[in-house]
Amino acid sequence: MPVIRFVREGRDVTCYPGENLREVALREGVEIYGLKGKLGNCGGCGQCITCFVAVEEPATGAATLTPRTVVEERKLLKRPGNWRLACQALVQHSVIVVTRPQVALQDGDRRLAEAQQQPLPEGPTSWPAVEAPAEPEEEASTTTTTGEGRP
């Protein structure tokens, strides 16, 4: 499974390919919101821009997240090019993320360099196959009836 390395939190979290970055972070207890976002956010519709994160692409050049959406292009027009709205980004491959990039990260350069030096597992690129459950065989009726129509 892809791994999301949250630099600020010092955590690696696994997810399935195609999962929403915001939903994974919230599920895993990673705080992506600052004070404004905690007080009120749009719930993942891309309208409030309180869930933005900085994404560090690997040197391999592989796309780790889906491309920016039209909503992101509009809302993040004056933000750095590596910022994304977590609610609009789907994880494709392992990725390094800095939550709340607008807040200074103590020893940020060192911590980011360390996160980039540690290899990220590639993980599978698809959801696990689920086998359909076997249909139960119909049991033959072994009940005998009396002449009165009752068993």
Image: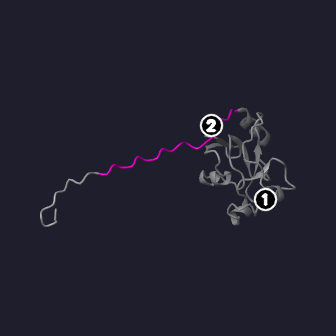
View extreme (front): residue: 147
Q: CA distance from mark 1 to mark 2?
A: 29 Å
Q: Amino acid at mark 1?
A: Val
How packed mark 1 is, by other alpha carbons closer than 10 Å (few <14, some 14-19, many 20 or more), is some
How packed mark 2 is, by other alpha carbons closer than 10 Å (few <14, some 14-19, many 20 or more), is some
**Which quadrant holds residue 4?**
top right
Asked if residue 18 lies left or right of residue 143, the reply is right
**Which quadrant holds residue 145?**
bottom left
Q: Amino acid at mark 2?
A: Gly
Residue in view at x 73 percent, y 35 percent? 114
Q: Is residue 127 magenta?
A: yes
**Foreground residue among 145 and 36:** 145
Q: Earlier in the sequence, mark 1 or mark 2?
A: 1
Magenta stretch prevailing secondary structure: loop
Whole-percent x and y of residue 128?
Answer: 55, 42
> Which mark, by number, is residue 123?
2
From which residue to which does the magenta span run? 118-138
Q: Is residue 66 magenta?
A: no
Residue in view at x 76 percent, y 36 percent? 113
**Foreground residue among 57 and 117:** 57
Residue in view at x 16 percent, y 66 percent? 149
Whole-percent x and y of residue 2?
Answer: 64, 41
Quick one: quadrant of the C terminus?
A: bottom left
> Which mark, by number, is residue 71?
1
Quick one: quadrant of the N terminus?
A: top right
> Which mark, by number, is residue 29?
none
Whole-percent x and y of residue 3?
Answer: 64, 41
Residue in view at x 50 percent, y 45 percent? 130
SS class, disc 1: helix
